[in-house]
Amino acid sequence: MKISATIITLNEEKKLARALESLVPVVDEIVVVDSGSADSTESIARHFTDRFLFNKWPGYAAQKNYAAAQASNDWILSLDADECLSSELQHSIIEIKKTPLSVAGYKFPRKTLYIGRWIEHSGWYPDRKIRLYDRNAGRWEGQFVHESVKVDGEVGTLFGDLLHYSIDSIFDHAKVANRYTDLAAEEMFARNRRARITDFVFLPSVTFVKSYLLQQGFRDGLPGFCIASFAAYYVFLKYAKLWELWHQPNCSKEESAAKNKSAGNGK
């Protein structure tokens, strides 16, 4: 069983090396697909692989499928530039390479470092993702936001965490919320969804209660409270942006979709 790792990038010089270093002991090939970095992303990537490719940004899922198509092996391990394999997950992957199961993909938990603290509740953990898959049986789906791998077949589970170094500050979280609510609003707009008063009055509060109480965000300390608050803010903001899209003069769905495509990945 040979594995090709794929990573898509855009100005990822701060976090890319950590991701690539974690892949070297595990995979047989690393493919990096860039959409126009202006920093040192390319030079960092070329320290680890000669498979550094450029592809104009087509959207998250499409870019990841493009990267998988460029790989030499059918088994794909897809990471974002701000993720890396824990030592336990590295060991799990090495073991299945020796004796692979008859499955179409593997899922494993993802743990996020949030402003210096590993989050273990709040709906953020274990957050299991399919990231290792046979490209003949699976592909990335999701036109706008929250893309994921869909496989045709059984999915196995691996031990060990995928470590996610996503948010370093409150400012970072605000930027992420702003970017993803743009995409979420675009997705709802494309489905002819309209914002209702109940979306503004009830859903943010319900979201906070779910994250902080039902999903035990209080056990993550003050970061857990911040996560729940941002989750509520995210819900409010995406419906506010959806309302705005419907009330912009002379804004068609085609123009809105074009704006989303030109935004770049920014993950």
Image (cartoon, grey):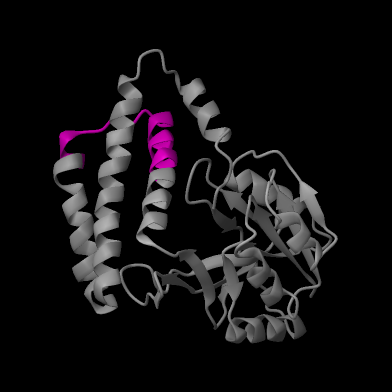
> Residue 155, percent across and down?
57, 70
Residue 154 visible somewhere in the drawing: no
Residue 201: in magenta span: no
Instruction: Out of 141 and 256, give the one closest to the viewer.
Output: 256
Query: Relative to 254, does residue 33 appear above or below in the rendering?
Result: below
Task: Count numbered badges in the picture.
Answer: 0
Q: Residue at x 25, y 44 (%)?
A: 236
> Residue 149, percent across and down?
57, 57
> Farthest residue in the front direction?
39
| Type of secondary structure dominating the magenta stretch | helix
**177 to the left or right of 25:** left
> Residue 162, percent across and down?
54, 74
Residue 192: in magenta span: yes
Instruction: Out of 98 and 6, give the one closest to the viewer.
Output: 6
**25 to the left or right of 250:** right
Specify start and end residues of the magenta stretch as a single range.
181-199
Q: Residue at x 79, y 75 (%)?
A: 1
Q: Residue at x 76, y 51 (%)?
A: 69
Instruction: Out of 262 and 98, give the one closest to the viewer.
Output: 262
> Residue 187, percent across and down?
43, 37
Query: Which quarter of the figure has residue 19?
Result: bottom right
